[in-house]
Amino acid sequence: MTGYAHIAANLAEVKARIAKQAKDWQRAPDAVHLVAVGKTHPAEAIEAALAAGHRVFGENRVQEAAAKFPALRVRHPDLRLHLIGPLQSNKIKQAVEVCDAIETVDRDKLAQGLAAELAKSGKRLDLFIQVNTGEEEQKAGILPRDADDFIRRCRAEYQLPIVGLMCIPPAEEHPAPHFALLGEIAKRHGLAKLSMGMSGDYELAIQMGATHVRVGTAIFGVREVKA
Ligand SMILES: *Cc1c(COP(=O)(O)O)cnc(C)c1O
């Protein structure tokens, strides 16, 4: 076992960088939330981040989230878990049970299923709509041209607690136009939260208005298995 001492140091470094960007760009110190993405890393790694005082985490698979987080939550009831990966309809119930926020609402069937499950469980989650800003075929997310109508339906018809938008820009493109597009769509709908920016570009994302940055590698290290 190599231990997880690097995690506290990495967290401190990322938090210092976030604080600097927030200050430089005249954002409130608490305007940017760090979602620490521990996917593929064991519960001990998450535990190290918790011991360092961090409380907000992201997982991209419901099954992995369900395997790791309920036990961690017993010891740390104030932790918050965001689902940041695609959600299949048959996993909605489990996702609502295990998570506090779902960032990947992107189609009517999922929106309807979430509405039903939230009503049934009485649980209150924060929901983000994922926008496929790069219009990539293999990527989840509502297409930009369909986003306005979908956002309206989610709020008016399905009455979902939509708090903001999320995007994952194409890996091979500069992220700035994607961050800008996400911000424009959010603004049209008066949505306050923008989940954008990962290890390689979270500082730019903060400059462009991110309220949530999802950082994995820069905190937990390189993933050895595919997420
Ligand atoms: C894995 C993942 C991240 C974190 O990526 P890093 O480059 O390791 O910081 C962010 N967002 C989503 C949706 C992810 O799946």
Image (spheres, rainbow, N blue to C red):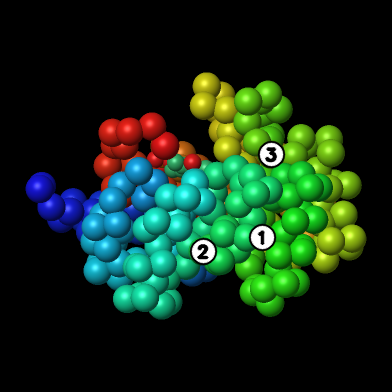
Read off the residue under disc 2.
98
Label 2 vs 3, first from the N-terminus: 2
> Looking at this view, is 189 or 75 the one in front?
75
Give, as a three-letter code, the residue at label 1.
Answer: Leu
Q: Nearer the viewer, mark 1 or mark 2?
A: 2
**Could you classify mark 3 by the number of other residues whose Cα lies within 10 Å: few (under 14), some (14-19), or many (20 or more)?**
many
Which residue corresponds to the image point at 49% horizontal and 46% vertical from the top-left?
60
Looking at the rendered structure, the secondary structure element under dot 1 is strand
Read off the residue under disc 1.
127
Read off the residue under disc 3.
141
Residue 22 seen in this snapshot: no
Q: Decide: marks 3, 1 in contact (CB < 8 A)?
A: no
Indicate left or right for 37 with 45 as reference: right
Q: Position of residue 57 (x, y in %)?
A: 43, 59
- Disc 2: residue Cβ within 8 A of ligand 1's nearest atom: no
> Looking at this view, is 171 or 93 the one in front?
93
Cα distance in 3D space between marks 3 and 1: 13 Å
Cα distance in 3D space between marks 1 and 2: 14 Å
Residue 123, relative to residue 64: is it above or below?
below
Looking at the rendered structure, the secondary structure element under dot 2 is helix
Which residue corresponds to the image point at 37% horizontal and 58% vertical from the top-left?
68
